Image: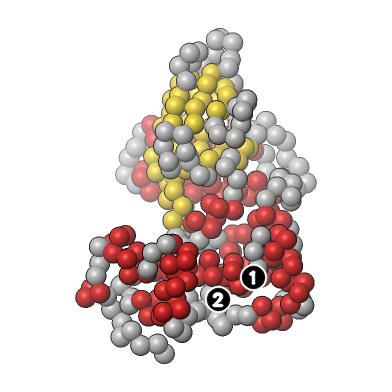
Amino acid sequence: MHNADAFFEVFESARVKGGGAAIQTLQVGQPLEFSQVSACFHFIEGAPCRLHISGYRQGLFLQTGDLVVLPHGGSHKLEYTGDGAAEAKVTTCDFRLEGPAGKLLVSALPALLHVTGAGQPSASFPDSPREWLSVTLAAIRKEADRPSLGSVVMLSRLIDLLFVWSLRHWLMTSSPEATSLARALDDSVLSHALVLLHAQPARNWSVDGLASELNQSRSNLSQRFVETLGEPPMRYLTRWRMQLAAEMLVSSKLRISLVAERVGYGSEPAFSRAFKRQFGTTPTDYRIAKTGRNSKQLVGSGRLK
């Protein structure tokens, strides 16, 4: 199994919720401006254009067949750079990441993923970007142009598929030094560690216990985490637990004590302190702000087993 497979095990719960799709024409002197906060894709056909976004002083040149993914969303602009003889057609898809791993996933990704459609298959990535994108985008455009029974679901699934494919392309073609996540996934020890922590968040983990599972020394494992992911193992685990807890507070009616238990805390006060450090508010206030539910609407005895 390629180490990158660990990525999809670790972030399986980061569900991709596809939104709408739109097809627009880009012409001379008529840029397309996007003020949206949500994440999105842009697929370019026809004449070339330039993407203007924070962090790219000269903009990013895009040509026909290119796909650009903006996982963090944000305002940006597409500007026509052709010779005027042809239009540029832009297919845009909105999406958002849901589930407990969504924020962790977004934080691990760069502001922009660029898939060059003119690229050729390689040993590391045998799929042809041009062929794959052409087929997938054609299906998206068909559902957007001629909606029928089930089109909303179809669009969401297609956008989900496109996002996963884009991530796979990025992981398998970018330099391992590009991001901390890419480096971690290229490390067989760290990729295994992430799978274990994500699969068993309620387990009474310690650095020694995790190191033993991986046949590593405590010092070597801690050093790998800090050098690659920028934080020690238990701090990473705490962030993951808090994301899981936040999801449960919103999506379930479990009492706080039961949520705490399910993410590895035997003490509700200790859990509440950790949650407040992560989100700046208590679990109770977080739940009320997100759902409006109060304690009378919750279930569970509140007693830890």
Residue 247 in sight: no
The quarter of the displayed image where residue 299 is located: bottom left
Q: Position of residue 34 (x, y in %)?
A: 44, 31
Q: Position of residue 302 (x, y in %)?
A: 33, 84
Colour scheme shown:
secondary structure
| Amino acid found under the numbered disc labelled 2 | Gln
Residue designated by label 1: 233
Q: Residue at x 51, y 16 (%)?
A: 87
Marks 1 and 2, how far apart in space? 14 Å
Q: Residue at x 45, y 24 (%)?
A: 32
Q: Is residue 250 above or below residue 196?
A: above
- Marks counted in the figure total 2
| Amino acid found under the numbered disc labelled 1 | Pro
Secondary structure at badge 2 equals loop
Residue designated by label 2: 200
Numbered circle sitting on residue 130: none
Residue 129 in sight: yes
Quadrant location of the C terminus in the rendered image = bottom left
Q: Position of residue 83 (x, y in %)?
A: 59, 10
Q: Position of residue 89 (x, y in %)?
A: 50, 24
Secondary structure at badge 1 equals helix
Please tell me how crowded label 1 is: few (under 14), some (14-19), or many (20+) other residues with Cα within 10 Å. many
| Of the two numbered discs 1 and 2 in the rendering, the one whose residue sits closer to the viewer | 1
Q: Residue at x 55, y 81 (%)?
A: 203
Q: Is residue 62 above or below residue 283?
A: above
